Amino acid sequence: MPRTHKTKGFTLVELMLVAVLLGIVGLAIVATFAGGLKIFDRMESYTAAKTDVLLSMEKMEKDLRSTFPVKGVGFIGEAKKMTFPAILRTVSAKGQAEESLGSVSYYLDNAGDVRALSREERTYIQAVQKGSSEHGDIAVLAPIEDLNFQYFSYDPEAETYSWVNLWDKSEPKEDQKEEGKAPKGVIALENRPEDIPLGVRIKISYRDGDKTLTLNRTVFIKTAVSLNLAKKKAKAEKHNSKKVESEQ
């Protein structure tokens, strides 16, 4: 009886399974490649100009978040310039890191041929001398077209929050104080003045090639927000206490 040889091959189900697997692998490769292109395009969009502005805003935000009330060094905010207390970090001749109290200013510098965002550090002695024209250490951070600051303020009488263009709660001179108006002793928490705004809104416009672009950032200051919440809580507790006493 003659032997018969069966021809071995792939079934239709096996062919379809291989096709599906190849399709899945192909889609994964295409998705990975497309993701890589998106990341590359995003990195390409971060030009040198945008990088300088972003790094400057990061430094500004870090300084703002760490500010706190300091007697003699007020928070003074204008539309184009902002000055506030800060911890200055320097390196000594021996290479040791040192910290000292002072002030930092961010402002739009129009003095040169190109507008720029500049940062000035002043020591505590320089900062408390209000009328002094002596400059501190100035660093040019980034070329920009325009700079605007706004300050988040709380009105305790109206109990409303709003953005204002100016902030200056610095203490008046001794000869400008009205008699009997100067606070004496310990000031109740709910009556403490808010020397620092709750937040700062930053708007920077800069040139990138032939386009003018704008970056916005809002920074809330922890010390001011904490004080505001504590004052509202103390005021509510005092109001409730008076209400209970009146009911009794």
Image (spheres, rainbow, N blue to C red):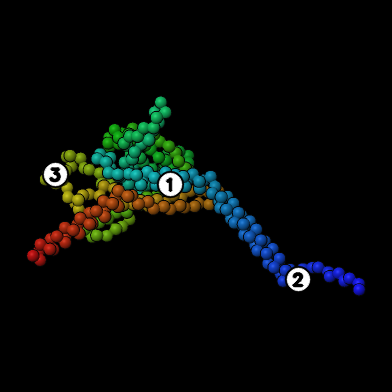
Q: At x 59% / y 56%, what residue is drawn?
A: 35
Write down the quadrant of residue 81 in the picture: top left
Q: CA distance from mark 3 to mark 1?
A: 40 Å
Measuring from the top left, give residue 168's x and y in whole percent. 28, 47
Q: Is residue 61 left or right of residue 180?
A: right
Q: Is residue 236 above or below residue 181?
A: below
Tell me the SS state at disc 1.
helix
Residue contact at pointers 3 and 2, CB within 8 angstroms: no
Name the mark nearer the viewer: 1 or 2. 2
Name the mark nearer the viewer: 3 or 1. 3
Amino acid carrying label 1: it is Met
Name the mark nearer the viewer: 3 or 2. 2
Q: Residue 11's mark?
A: 2
| Residue 29 shows up from this direction | yes
Q: Count residues near mark 1 (Cα–Cα under 10 Å), then give few for <14, some for 14-19, many for 20+.
A: many
Measuring from the top left, give residue 171's x and y in whole percent. 22, 43
Which badge, 3 or 1, is on the more N-terminal residue? 1
Amino acid carrying label 3: it is Gly
Query: Which residue carries the number 3 mark?
Result: 185
Q: Which residue is at the front of the view, 208 or 156?
A: 156
Query: Which residue carries the number 1 mark?
Result: 57
- Quadrant placement of the N terminus: bottom right
Which badge, 3 or 2, is on the more N-terminal residue? 2
Which badge, 1 or 2, is on the more N-terminal residue? 2
Amino acid carrying label 2: it is Thr
Q: Is residue 128 above or below residue 77?
A: above
Q: Spot the residue most to the top.
A: 94
